[in-house]
Image: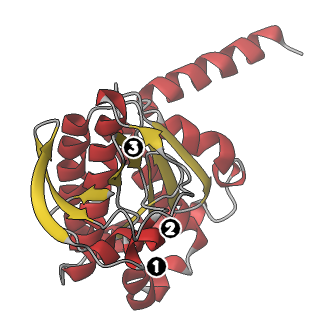
């Protein structure tokens, strides 16, 4: 029995970062997208550690004595290894590596990245350290709504034209389904997101000062009360000017009916 995973990780890291691995039992190779079976291996001592290539991707390989591992017959959430499942492996691995670097880095950030345990999904939320150090920003309901719209719009523009579904059921929390993009595209998006995440930290204090007056008007606004309709539109990357034009046309049409 063998397990394969990214060389940047240790075995115990796989559970911590929900990183993916590949499991070989006999001649069968399977993908465990979030290493949910890792406890099986942590109870054993590897007899050999090497590096091997799978689909031209060099991975760390730990081999276990088959007589010791014979009783470990229960594995769950495994997908047969093929080119499609390996592409998902690479995307989840990109997320896991980002999460690990994020944890070890002292660089300031606004949004925190987490690897979801649901398919090929990433979860974005406000970094707790930023939240604690900026209580005045997040106690202002109107500014929180503006910030929510800015982030949703940024994500929508970032993912525009890509088969990425963005869901947000509560303010400043977003789930991105990446299962239908390539690992190459995921890597490019990760780089662009990292640049945004660094820049907004430097900008947000100034944004609060500039937008405080406008934010006050959004305290009890119609748009805020209907967030569940506004945010999905922004997450689709829709240009606000197009939305305004359509609302104007609708208003004119309703006025023309003279009801």
Front label number (3 vs 2): 3
Q: Nearer the viewer, residue 96 or 124?
A: 96
Question: Residue at label 2?
Answer: 143
- Determine the CA span between mark 1 and mark 3: 46 Å
Closest to the observer, 227 or 100 = 100
Q: Position of residue 119 (x, y in %)?
A: 50, 46
Q: Is 2 on the left or on the right of 107, as rendered?
A: right
Q: Residues within 10 Å of mark 3 (few under 14, many from 20)?
A: some
Residue contact at pointers 3 and 2, CB within 8 angstroms: no
Task: Look at 38% across and 90% down and name the residue there.
Answer: 133
Query: Is residue 127 something that shows in the picture?
Result: no
- For mark 1, what is the residue? 137
- Residue at 42%, 29% (x, y): give it: 241
| Residues marked 1 and 3 touching at CB (< 8 Å) | no
Give me the C-alpha separation between circle 3 and circle 2.
Answer: 47 Å
Q: How many angstroms separate mark 1 from mark 2 (CA)?
A: 7 Å
Q: Is residue 146 above or below residue 16?
A: above
The image quadrant where one finds the C terminus is top right
Q: Are marks 1 and 2 in contact (CB under 8 Å)?
A: yes
SS of the residue under disc 2: helix
Give the residue at x 38% y 86%: 129
Left or right: 1, with 79 as reference point: left
Q: Nearer the viewer, residue 48 or 31?
A: 48
Farthest right residue?
259
Q: Position of residue 21 (x, y in %)?
A: 33, 55
Judge depth for marks 1 and 3 and give the one in front: 3
Q: Which mark is residue 30?
A: 3
Secondary structure, mark 1, is helix
Q: Quadrant of residue 187?
A: top left
Q: Secondary structure at mark 3?
A: strand
Residue 51, quarter of the rendered image: bottom left
Mark 1 neighbour density, 10 Å: few (under 14) some (14–19) many (20 or more) = some
């Amino acid at each position: 029995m063998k397990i394969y995973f990214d060389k940047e990780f240790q075995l115990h890291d796989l559970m911590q970062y929900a990183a993916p691995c590949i499991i070989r039992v006999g001649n069968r190779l399977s993908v465990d997208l979030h290493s949910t079976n890792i406890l099986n291996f942590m109870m054993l001592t590897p007899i050999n550690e090497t590096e091997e290539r799978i689909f031209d991707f060099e991975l760390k390989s730990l081999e276990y004595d088959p007589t010791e591992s014979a009783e470990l017959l229960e594995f769950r959430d495994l997908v047969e290894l093929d080119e499609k499942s390996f592409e998902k492996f690479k995307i989840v691995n990109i997320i896991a590596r980002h999460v690990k670097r994020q944890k070890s880095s002292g660089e300031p950030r606004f949004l925190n990245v987490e690897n979801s345990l649901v398919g090929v999904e990433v979860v974005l939320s406000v970094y707790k350290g930023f939240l604690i150090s900026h209580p005045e920003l997040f106690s202002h309901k109107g500014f929180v709504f503006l910030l929510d719209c800015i982030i949703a719009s940024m994500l929508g523009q970032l993912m525009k034209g890509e088969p990425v579904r963005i869901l947000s059921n509560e303010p400043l929390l977003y789930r991105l389904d990446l299962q239908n993009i390539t690992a190459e595209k995921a890597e490019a998006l990760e780089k662009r997101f990292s640049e945004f995440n660094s820049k907004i930290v430097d900008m947000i204090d100034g944004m609060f000062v500039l937008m405080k007056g406008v934010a006050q008007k959004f305290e009890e606004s119609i748009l805020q009360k209907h967030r569940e309709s506004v945010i999905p539109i922004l997450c689709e990357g829709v240009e606000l000017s197009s939305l305004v034009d359509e609302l104007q046309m609708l208003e004119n049409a309703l006025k023309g009916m003279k009801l």
